[in-house]
Amino acid sequence: MTDINVTEDKEKKSLNFIEQVVENDLKEGKNDGKVQTRFPPEPNGYLHIGHAKAICMDFGIAAKYGGICNLRFDDTNPTKEDLEYVEAIKEDIKWLGFDWGNEYYASDYFQQLWDFAIDLIKRGKAYIDEQSAELIAQQKGTPTQAGTNSPFRERPIEESLELFYKMNSGELEEGSMVLRAKIDMSSPNMHFRDPIIYRIVKTPHHRTGTTWKAYPMYDFAHGQSDYFEGVTHSLCTLEFVPHRALYDLFVDWVKNEKDLNDHRPHQYEFNKLNLNYTLMSKRNLLILVKENLVNGWDDPRMPTLCGFRRRGYSPESIRNFVDKIGYTTYDALNDFALLESAVRDDLNKKATRVSAVLDPVKLIITNYPEGKVEEMEAINNPEDLTAGSHTIEFSRELWMEREDFMEDAPKKFFRMTPGQDVRLKNAYIVNCTGCKKDANGNVIEVYAEYYPDSKTGMEGSNRKVKGTLHWVSCDHCLKAEVRVYDRLWKVENPRDEMAAIREEKNCDALEAMKEMINPYSLQVMKECYVEKFLSTTKPLDYLQFQRIGYFTPDKESTSDNLIFNRTVSLKDTWSKINKN
């Protein structure tokens, strides 16, 4: 009995705080034993790595407790939203490994929200304010000083009703008036100081066209949409903690303050995913795209999910990373190296091992017969022997990495140097005999002799050598372009650094960004060689270029123009570089 209790206790402790809330609700029979969540992105940009945490929480909670998670697009601001983003968001969610129960839009509820607003006006809980946004903001007061009432706060109900209809008729200009909820201008909660709940927007909506000119604000639409859909657990990030009381109030109001304790959505907040060397604001990401500082939303340097996908990150690695950092009620800055570590761990299990030479120099095996070609067996993945193997051709002339040769090498250099034995991966042990240089002293050829009895798998192959090098046959390889990606920003906290630069130099966000961009975030290598086996690979295939790193074919890659993106290096080199 004791062992069982200990096991149950450990399982209980392993639950995050939201899972504990859900389990308690189920235990108490709340919501008729139902669990329903929602993921509510605004379709004004592409999803980034920060959204992955919310996706894993929203969909994960529903899946774990036999519930349902709906996808609801928060499309209440037509000036920034587009169908392109809608489709991209759906693709990213599915790639990450999730699917939604139902697809909803805040615009589905525009009529219900409008009717609710009309009801609030009639009940004296909302009024039309014709002041400018600046004046309204000034009257809000401060966290320590009460606000002052709008001169329109006691406007007659019929007058507010008439003007509210005019807001949606198209005859009024944007910014000329707003609808405000009448709550408490002296409340210590700034969000209670008569918040704006409707404004005029004349931009056509991507779904409703020009039907509406008055649009609800997020705080007004969100809680009610949750209620309309039957959401039980409304999960969001910590910046919405101050909004929770307003969320609850509007849900109370939509039901005319009836008892909702048993059937109402409850908001719970968890910490955002913050990464160093990363900028995740959609506004700033849009600047990068529009100003061509990156090559689109799916540039592999971007923190977008489509960018990570194009770079070769696996969905499993992102989910594992989110699970590893966990969910708390306080924000923290996570190390990008931890995400890269999760990627390495996952790709090590699934990536096909292949040979590629990025900075080639010719290696000639002088005692190997001219014209002879051998097929060597290459294991696809030593971590998964069911993945099989493929063949790689070996011949007299090979390409090897330039950095693997050193004419005058230090004592602990275990690669190619005159007089030293080294194994060629999956092939023979060779002894370096020298090199040839051009007029400028650059090495153009390396020479070696092979031991015929040292072929991998032969009895004589057990000879111990300290170095193993990769290679490709000059006559049996393909030329390729390799794009080596690294962090886009050269500063650890680009958000704070950008703010400091803007304040110091009185410049805009674009100029500040240009100062922070890492000039080595993309290096294009066009004279690379890969084994022929890679001619059939396709985007999203996971590859390990042996001794170099993990790679994937780019979406622009073709059989006639092979292009590979580096996903991540084999080891974390960034932290070492920055410590030196």
Image (cartoon, rainbow, N blue to C red):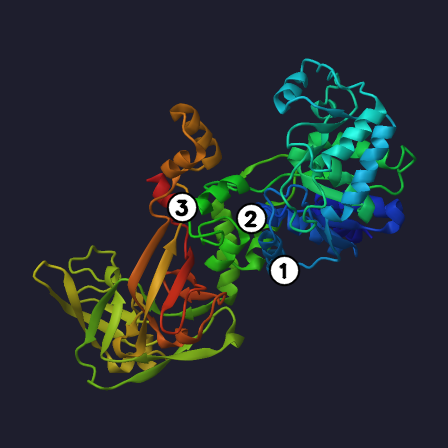
State how many labels appear. Answer: 3
Q: Which residue is mark 3?
A: 293
Whether residues under marks 2 and 1 lie with C-beta atoms below 8 angstroms apart, the answer is no
- Of circles 3 and 1, which is in front? 3
What SS does tag 2 mark? helix
CA gap, disc 2 and disc 3: 19 Å
Q: Is residue 46 left or right of residue 62?
A: left
CA gap, disc 2 and disc 1: 14 Å
Q: Which residue is mark 2?
A: 49
- Of circles 2 and 3, which is in front? 3
Image coordinates of residue 503 in percent, x first then y, are 43, 24
Image coordinates of residue 297 in percent, x first then y, are 49, 51
Which of 42/416 is in front? 42
User: For the point 17% across and 81% down, which residue is it?
Assistant: 367
User: For the point 89% across and 41% down, which residue is it?
Assistant: 262
Q: Which amino acid type corresponds to the residue marked 2 in the rendered image?
A: Ile
What SS does tag 3 mark? loop
Q: Is residue 405 above or below residue 388?
A: above
The reply to whether residue 42 is visible in this rendering is yes
User: For the point 55% across and 48% down, which residue is it?
Assistant: 48
Disc number at residue 94?
1
Which of the image's four quarters has the C terminus? Answer: top left
